[in-house]
Amino acid sequence: MIHIKTDEEVERMRKTCTLAAEVLLMIEPYVKPGVTTDRLNDICHDFIISNGAIPSPLNYRGFPKSICSSVNDEICHGIPKDRKLRNGDVVNLDITTYLDGFHGDTSRTFFVGSPRKSQMRLVDVCRESLDLGIKQVRPGGRLGDIGATIQQYVEGFGYSVVREFCGHGIGVNFHEEPQVLHYGNFGKGVEMKKNMVFTIEPMVNEGEPGLRVLPDKWTAVTKDGSLSVQFEHTILVTETGYEVLTRIDGKTPF
Ligand code: MF3
Ligand code: CO
Ligand code: CO
């Protein structure tokens, strides 16, 4: 069942989503060569707690940390650890907050030190594909409009869209219906309705779309070892279109 939010629930979604967006802004200056993903986890954890919220990933289905950190060929669900980031790494930090009974979910990819041109291109395409997907959101539209838009754009550059993971409804539950695929066909899929809330979170690989999950049971990596990047927003369907709940105007750079 897809839960359509009441206006009061939407207000609470705005608060938790704004906090998640603030975490990404807060952590940016710490993402530098030499920092461990454990340290980034701890800084985010403390910030979330000090704002009266709980990091949703912690203990979620056994996930051991408070954020996901996915480096280079890691697609998603990377577990923070005692690993120093190095110049030239690319890292996605995925932040989910639980505040006043509601979850907010957002992630972005950071460059560690100086990026290579090919890395910048892949990240630009992923960020832009999310933005184009978001612009498809409106009541009466179909989820397939979002997926088809993202897929077309990404594949036009010779990159590939990961298929095993998707966006999702979000609210009282971290993951709820509907599934929001990042590929598909225009005019197909679930019809969007006012006050639906879901994430869009394309994972884009430089190479082949295939993945495998590491023995830690969480970290998904590209089969071919190629670079993978991701951006994620939580989106509200409004009367006329959309509101990006995890974007702070004038601050959030995506
Ligand atoms: N935040 C991820 C998403 O966008 C889910 C992480 S699940 C976890 O859906 F357990 F790994 F935290
Ligand atoms: Co999500
Ligand atoms: Co997320």
Image (cartoon, rainbow, N blue to C red):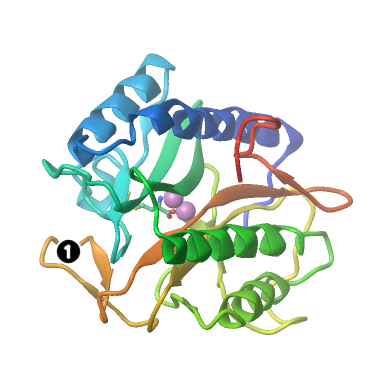
Along the horizontal axis of the image, is 82 left or right of 122? left
Q: Residue at x 42, y 32 (%)?
A: 28
Residue 196 percent across, percent down from the top left: 69, 52
Image quadrant holding the N terminus, namely bottom right
Compared to residue 201, the image places residue 53 above or below, namely above
Residue at 30 percent across and 52 percent down: it is 88
Residue 126 in the image: x percent, y percent?
54, 63
- Quarter location, residue 18: top right
Could you tell whether 5 is left or right of 39 in the image? right
The residue at which mark 1 appears reads as: 217
Q: Residue at x 60, y 40 (%)?
A: 253
Q: Quadrant of residue 42?
A: top left
Query: Which residue is more in the foreground, 114 or 55?
Result: 114
Residue 101 visible from this viewpoint: no
| 227 is higher (above) or lower (below) than 157 | above
Vertical arrangement, residue 228 with respect to residue 160, above or below: above
The residue lying toward the viewer, choosing from 162 and 160, is 160
How crowded pointer 1 is (Cα within 10 Å; few <14, some 14-19, many 20+) is rated as few
Q: Is residue 232 left or right of residue 119?
A: right
Q: Residue at x 20, y 50 (%)?
A: 62
Q: Secondary structure at mark 1?
A: loop
Instruction: Please state the horizontal and vertical placement of residue 220, each as a whole percent of the image.
Output: 27, 67
Looking at the picture, which amino acid does disc 1 mark?
A: Lys
- The picture places residue 174, in percent across and down from the top left corner, at 44, 48
Using the image as rendered, state which of residue 183 and residue 112 is in the foreground: 112
